[in-house]
Image: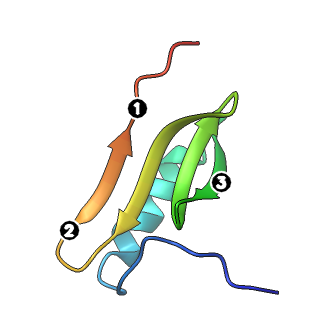
Amino acid sequence: MSEKKTWHSNELWEVELELLRSIINKTQLIVTNKWGGEVYTHNNKNVIGIGGFKQFLRFGSSMVFF
């Protein structure tokens, strides 16, 4: 089985990313893998993307109208 790609370039942000995942997992958002990273969706629309890079942590959101 192939390993799931993520936007993690190092292990620096593992604690923070796990905290974000634990919060997001309490919602109805569905995790998918897009553009090599974790993207959470609702009704097939991108809502949040998270990832750790060398010097920063990314938590991006999109405006979604339900």
How packed mark 3 is, by other alpha carbons closer than 10 Å (few <14, some 14-19, many 20 or more), is some
Q: Position of residue 20 (x, y in %)?
A: 43, 55
Q: Is residue 2 above or below residue 14?
A: below
Q: Quadrant of the N terminus?
A: bottom right
- State left or right for residue 63 relative to residue 28: left
Dividing the picture into quarters, in which one does residue 46 lie?
A: top right
The residue type indicated by label 2 comes to Phe
Question: Alpha carbon of mark 1 to alpha carbon of mark 2: how far?
Answer: 19 Å
Question: Alpha carbon of mark 1 to alpha carbon of mark 3: how far?
Answer: 15 Å
- State left or right for residue 29 relative to residue 39: right
Q: Which residue is mark 3?
A: 32
Reading the chain from its start, which is encountered first: label 1 or label 3? 3
For the point 37% across and 86% down, the residue is: 11
Reading the chain from its start, which is encountered first: label 1 or label 2? 2
Q: Is residue 11 above or below residue 46?
A: below
Q: Which residue is mark 1?
A: 62
